[in-house]
Every structure is written in structure tokens, then in C-alpha cells.
Amino acid sequence: MGRDFKMWLWYKSGQFLRDPSNMHFTTYSTHPFKDQRPGTSGLRKRVEVFRQGNYLKNFVQSVFDTQRELVGGTLVLGGDGRFYNREAIQIILRMAAANGVARVLVGQGGLLSTPAASCVIRKYGAAGGLILSASHNPGGPDGDFGIKYNTANGGPAPEKVTEAIYARTLEITNFRSIDEEDVELDDLGSYQLSETQIEVIDPVADYADLMASIFDFDAIRALLAGGFRIRFDAMHAVTGPYATRILEQTLGAPAGTVINGEPLEDFGGHHPDPNLVHAAELVAMTQGPDGVDFAAASDGDGDRNMILGRDFFVTPSDSLAVLAANATLIPAHRGGIPGVARSMPTSQAVDRVAAAMGIECFETPTGWKFFGNLLDAGRIAFCGEESFGTGSNHVREKDGLWAVLAWLNVLAARGQSVADIVTGHWQQYGRNYYSRHDYEGIKGKAADQLMKDLRARLPQLPGTFLDGLEVGYADDFSYTDPIDGSVSQRQGVRIGFSNGSRIVFRLSGTGTVDATLRVYLESFEPNVASQGLDPQVALAALISTANELAQIQLLTGRAAPDVIT
Ligand code: G1P
Ligand code: ZN
């Protein structure tokens, strides 16, 4: 390529901020892929899709082409360690150098949990971050891979950014890279890649410091020293090193507290998804006379959490409500929290806490990116989703270990068992029975038809009775962001009954094959004597109403859901 052409390219791309004479990059031509629109949480596809041709490179170049603050700025880079993570990191490092990124902070071994990446972006004032993960989806050559861009606030890029990246992927004609050896990812240190400084950082240190600044570590240490028994299941995913350092090495939990702690490229062949189905080994450790007092698990990239007590499962919706009600026991929130937020399908348990505390409560669409503006504006401090996501204003991602430490902090301060804290909470605020039914791998056409039929019926539903329950409202959730006024439509069909029960239907935006229908069910029980039922029993009537209303069996051929949480 001629120097003049290179100069022209350099000028056109706005790289005149950097000295072009030192930049030795090559421009390669490419052709757009039509399917690179990010979903609920970044671009997720089968590994084989990411490995074809220039698939990854196209997406990464589209990020560099549209997110110009990266030129001359700092990029944070890391992933959950799944298959293809290391290869992808080397590709991105070379492209970052070719695109004029001044500095890249990359986690040792290519690892950074999603919340740790958010922490590092914020702490070092990075322009943004690329996180390589398909979260709780299985890994390995036949599994999934994913990539997402986080902005300078440390949070997932908002829709206007992901749409700009997507628009660029549709018209991309070339990408840039340099011809250099792989960077040594396993040794901490600073390396020069062309004009770009690559710093291989300890993936745990900054995050562990942040946790120590939030929680009462002395109280947790004393709790554990007093014989309170805990287990943490890292599911052979990224949180192993984080949990070992914090729970065992810093807080003094005995060795062996962290199980499945070694990150593996295929997560040991399992689904790194912390729920009752996929973390069955951990659940068993909480049962019976030898059951531990507290157990928790996290997912592939460390942002999800599951909380268990002895013989007791805490639903993520209840977990958010309990933590909000006990926020002032956590040193960082001693002065109280300004407000809370939950995703629309999450149970309304936290709404009751907010009402009692006289603080704001927001209902947002599914996906953590919708909490970012509220957190940045200081309107909320805690937020969560029914899908095992809980977090606070300390980073801009949900954070599995944060939730675990928050629970340990509350347990240490209250000196009660998990079960006593949650049942006491129900007695005070009422119980929101809650369950989610997932129908996985259904045909896209059938799923679309089901949602279309439901939407068509919405205007006629209010005021009618379904199985004896009066419909109070029926709509397709639309959200106007209170901070920037942006509107997100068609975020899920909700049907609310006059007794406070709800049914929500939406299609997953994170799957990679076929469609997944999610049905969310919720009822409210203020009567203490009736709060001890199995949720599937308490919700039985609502479950059958949902099935009939959406004609699930007729349209999908499925008589029962694949996963119930
Ligand atoms: C799912 C969850 C959602 C979460 C997302 C990323 O998205 O339902 O709450 O934010 O994973 O972890 P979905 O597949 O439903 O679009
Ligand atoms: Zn995740």
C-alpha cells in the first residue's frame, strides 16, 4: 500500500491525533456479515460462527470505526476464559495497535470477569472495554462465544451505541491489523506492540480492593472464624481466582470453600449457569443435617449469582429486596440508598421495600444496560434482575461476588440464618411468589407467531376475566429512560391482574440457536400462614392461565417448559 493512501486513510479516520509516521498497519479488505446486531448482552454466536473468515475482525473494526474515543485512549480487554478467548485477544490486540489505541489493559491469561472489567474501566479512566464472553452459555469448540463493548462509565454500551456498531458492520469494507508476534499474556508486565502499550494486569487485585472498600470484611471474617460454613461454586468459570483470593485468602474461609475453582475452556463440559438445575452439586451441599449454612455460585463471566441457605433457595427477586431492606448494614451504604431498580419481569418484591423506605423504584427493560443512566445519575444504588443478576453503583455491571459478599455482610450483621432473614422479610412485606418457565429451542417462526397473537389480543383484555381473575392492564412494555428520554419499545408482553398477580411473556435476546420463550409468573401473598408453599403450587392457576392465553402447547408443541427457575 502506498504511503499517500495510508496518509489519506489515517487522516480520514481521525487518527491525526497520533503520529502516523510510526504507525505500521495493514488494511485488509472484507465483506459485511448481516447478523452482527448485538442482543441483550453483546454479540453472541456459536464458536464456529466467530471463527469463520473475518467475522470477529469485522465486528471489532466496527467498534473502532464508531467509538472514536478509543483512538489515543485506553482500552480494557479480557474475557471469561472460554474456548477461543486467547486467540480472540491476540487478534484484538493487533487490531487495537493498528487502530491507534494508546494503551490496552488486558487481564493476565486473557481473563477478566465482567464486573472486574467494569471496575478496571472506571478505575483507570479507560475510554471503553471489550469483554469476551457468552456468559452462562456453554463453551468449547461446539459451544458459544461472545463479545461486547462497554463504554467509559464501565457499563454495557447503550442501544444507540450498539446500533451504530451494528450499522457499521453492514457497510464495512476493510479492517486494520499489524503483523506482529503474539503478546505474552501469562506474565504480568508492560509490552510495546507497535505504538501501543500493552499492560498485562492482575485480573483480581483492583476488584478485590474495591470489595474491601464496600463491605465489613472484619465482620465477615469473624462470622467465618466462628464456624459459619460456606461453599462457593465457581463452575470452572472465571470467578474461581476471584473467589479463592477474596473468600479463602482474604476472609479466611477454609481451603476447599471454593469448588470447581479452576477456569476451564469448556467449563468442564457443564453449563456455567448458577441455578437450581445447573448447580445441582452445590444445592446438595446445603441439604440435610450436614448442609452448609450458606452457598453461592456464579456464572461463566462472574456477573450472575445464586444464593442458598441451609435447605433454602433465595430467588434473585427476593435477594434484591432483602439486600435493599438491609442496605444500611453495609458500610458503603450506611447513609441509606437513594433508590432501586429492577427489570420489568423481575418480581415486585423490591417495590414494596422501596415504598416502605420512601425511596424511588424504577422498572426497566430486561438487560443491565438500562440501569446505567440511573446509576450514573445517582438515582439508584441497588438494582437487579430475576435472571440471577444483582448489583450496585460500585460498577456498571451485575456482580456475582458482590452479591455473595453483600449477603455475608448482612448475615454477619444480623446473626440469623438465611431462611430466617428471608421468611422474616416476607412476614414484614408480604411474599411475592415467583417463577420463570423457559421453553428452549423452539422454532423462530412459532415463537414470533405466539408473540404476535398475544400482542393482537392485548387491547381487548383489560376488564375481562381469565380463570376468575380480572385483568387490570395488558400491554407491550415500553420504557422511556428518565435520564436521557430515549424510548425502548416492545420489551415484553405483560398482563396484570387486579389482585396484584402478573404474567409476562418475552423472547430471549441472548440465545444463539432457535428461539427461547420466557414466561414469568408472579403472585402476591400478604397472609403469613399461606407463605410457605412451593411456588409451583402457589402459582399453579396462573401457570395454566398463561399456557392457555398464549396457546403455548398448540403453537410450540411443548407440553412443559425445559427449565423452571
Ligand atoms: C438473559 C436474562 C436477562 C439478562 C441477560 C444477560 O437475557 O433474561 O435478564 O440481562 O440474559 O445476562 P434474555 O436471554 O432473556 O434476553
Ligand atoms: Zn454472565
Image (tube, rainbow, N blue to C red):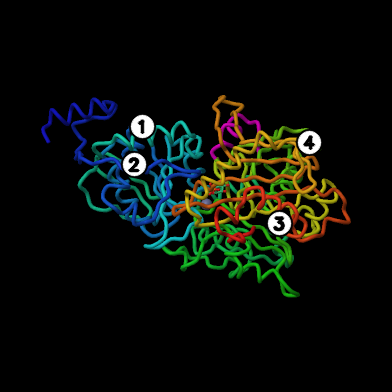
SS of the residue at dot 3? strand
**Nearer the observer, 509 or 375:** 509
Q: Any mark on residue 34, and which? A: 2
Is residue 441 among the parts visible in the rendering?
Answer: yes
Circle 1 packing at 10 Å, graded few (<14), some (14-19), many (20+), is some
Q: Is residue 254 magenta?
A: no
Query: Which of marks 4 and 1 precedes in the sequence?
Result: 1
Distance from Cα at disc 2 to Cα at disc 4: 46 Å
Query: Which of marks 3 and 2 precedes in the sequence?
Result: 2
Distance from Cα at disc 1 to Cα at disc 2: 17 Å
Q: Nearer the viewer, mark 2 or mark 3?
A: 2
**Nearer the observer, 351 or 22:** 351
Is residue 203 among the parts visible in the rendering?
Answer: no
Q: Any mark on residue 66, and which? A: 1
The part of the chain drawn in magenta is 369-381
**Nearer the observer, 34 or 395:** 34
Query: Which of marks 2 and 1 precedes in the sequence?
Result: 2
